[in-house]
Image: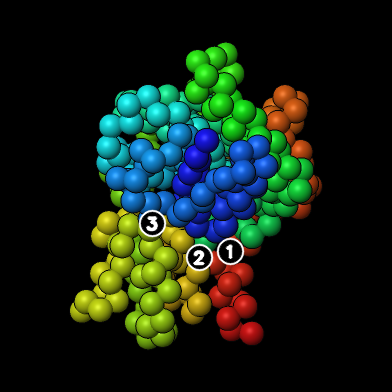
Amino acid sequence: MKTLVICFSQTGNTRRVAERIRDGIFEHTGQCDLVNMKDVDTQLLNGYDVVGLGCPVFYFKEPFHVLHFIEGLPPLNTQPWFVFCSHGAVMGQALFSMAASLEKKGALVIGSHHTYADITVPFYPKHTLTSGHPDDTDLMAAVDFGRSIAGCAQSVAKGDTRCITRPSEGLEAWARDMAAMCTPASLAERMPALSINLETCIQCGECEDACPVGGIDMGCDPPRIQEPCIYCFHCASICPTCSIEAEWGPLVASAPEKYQRYTHSLNRAEERGEFRWLVDPETVDCSQPLYKERKREIKS
Ligand SMILES: Cc1cc2nc3c(=O)[nH]c(=O)nc-3n(C[C@H](O)[C@H](O)[C@H](O)COP(=O)(O)O)c2cc1C
């Protein structure tokens, strides 16, 4: 059985999970390729018996460019696929939505896996509710998932489909509503516009290279930014001189209320045995967002 695992990962969480899933599949079948989504040759997908696709959750679902990647795939003719994601406090619709889009392309979705992970955005603190994840226990669960999905794919190939499990819709209605509300158009209106401070920018090009949708061009005059944009704000999080700026104030101000809701979701996930607290939520200080901390570090 030949397996390909495709992954988009920005801060490395999904990549770590993908590597462990690959290990589990390799243990079971002796083969498994792992490739970054941007390097996939979609014409070669039909050379695989099973394909996995993993990404972070952005705005309660898969990132917009991951959805575009799925929409651009050739017909999948009942090829077995599985989906996985890493996320902060609320996974929302991600797995359900990816599975539905793959099924539209003709894939047979045979299973899914999700992992709690840290979140890195300029307007939230560095130390967050899900900090410490994915830990060894989460990564071992990913290896187990790899083993079991490989076994399931082998059974399906023999005509036994009893192992197939389809991701269900997110449990929380408010997160479903948020996923539906967070369209590119609504985020363009609600999220802060980015600008480049040309006095401090050192033209290192890290933001251009890291933007998953090619939305930055420092070679233009004035430089092009957020055209297009998936509102991940990774460019602002990684700029070594904090030269990608925005009016983060309103998002910072709304963080405590959101974190109350997220704490509630995580407590419920803990009750269901899905989540383990690795931090004391009382120690999360929303008044110290990452962008301020990084600015302080750069000054000192
Ligand atoms: C712009 C943005 C939006 C996010 N939205 C959500 C979300 O709706 N729910 C959630 O649980 N985590 C959310 N996260 C957290 C990421 O899913 C999480 O950090 C993920 O592990 C990142 O994966 P990576 O390290 O592979 O890039 C968001 C992160 C970013 C940057």
Of residues 281 and 46, the one nearer the viewer is 46
Q: Quadrant of the C terminus?
A: bottom right
Q: What scheme was used to colour the molecule?
A: rainbow
Residue ID for mark 1: 290
Using a 10 Å C-alpha cutoff, classify the residue at mark 2 as few (fewer than 14 neighbours), some (14 to 19) or many (20 or more). Answer: some
Q: Real-space Cα distance between discs 1 and 2? A: 8 Å
Looking at mark 2, is its residue's CB closer than 8 Å to ligand 1?
Answer: yes
User: Is residue 109 among what the camera can see?
Assistant: yes
Sequence order check, earlier mark of 1 and 2: 2
The mark tally for this picture is 3
User: Is residue 123 among what the camera can see?
Assistant: no
Badge nearest the viewer, 3 or 1 = 3
Which label was assigned to residue 39?
3
For numbered disc 1, what is the local secondary structure?
helix
Give the residue drawn at x 50%, y 23%: 157
Instruction: Point out residue 242 in the picture as x, y percentages from the top left corner.
Output: 48, 75
